Image: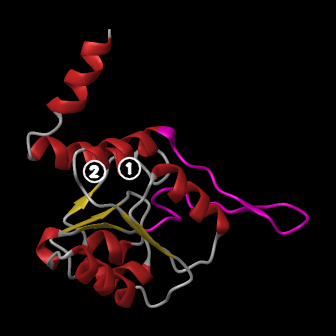
Amino acid sequence: MDVDGILTDGRIVMDDEGRETKFFDVRDGFGIVMFRKAGFKTAIISARPSRTILHRAKDLSIDKVVTDTYPKIGAYESMLKEFGFKDEEACYMGDDLPDLDIMQKVGFAVSVPDGRPEVRQSAHYVTTHRGGRGAVREVIEMIMKAQTLWNWPVAKEKRKK
C-alpha cells in the first residue's frame, strides 16, 4: 500500500525544525495486525522518504517497507519476487499518479474516494472510507470476509468477553 492518502489523510504537518507528523487511524492499524495474524503479507511503498513511516511500519510489524522510491514499480516487482507471489495474488491501495503502474498490474487494485480520477478509474474498488480514516481496514475486512477468515478475529474477541 501507499502511505500518504491511504494510511494517512494525505496531510503532512511539519514543525519549525522540519520534523514531520502524520495522522494514522488506529482501526487501520488493528486491521493490519489482524491481517498479518491471519497469514497475509503486508508492505508499504512510498515515494517519499519518511522516518515517521518507518516507525509506524515497525509498530505494526509490516513485512516490507520501501520509501524514497520513484517510480514505485521496481520496488513492487522486487517485493513480489521476494514474497513468491504473482501479480494476480496481490492487492495494492493507491491514490495518486505514482501508484498507477502498480495498480494496473495487481489482481485487486483499490483507491479511495478522494484519489485522483485516473487512479479511481484504474481501481477495481473504491473504498467508502477516506485514506487515513478506515480505508485500509475496509479493504482488509473485505478480503478476510471473502476468504471466510473474518470469523476468526470476531470469534476470538467474543471469547474474551
Residue 113 higher or lower than 134, as above or below: below
Residue nearest the observer in this picture, 135 or 17: 17
Residue nearest the observer in this picture, 85 or 23: 85
Q: Is residue 103 visible?
A: yes
Asked which secondary structure carries label 1, the reply is helix
- Disc 2 residue type (three-letter): Val
x%, y% of residue 144?
18, 44
Instruction: Decide whether residue 53 is among the magenta residues.
Output: no
Instruction: Decide whether residue 24 is among the magenta residues.
Output: yes
Q: Main secondary structure of the magenta part?
A: loop
Residue at image position (20%, 69%) is 90
User: Residue 155 sits in which quadrant?
Assistant: top left
Residue at image position (10%, 46%) is 146
Q: Which mark is residue 135?
A: 1
- Compared across the picture, whether 131 is left or right of 9 comes to left
Asked which secondary structure carries label 2, the reply is helix
The quadrant the N terminus occupies is: bottom left
Instruction: Assess whether mark 1 and mark 2 are in contact (beta carbons under 8 angstroms).
Output: yes
| Residue range highlighted in magenta | 1-26
Q: CA distance from mark 2 to mark 1?
A: 6 Å
Asked which colour scheme the image uses, the reply is: secondary structure
Residue carrying label 2: 139
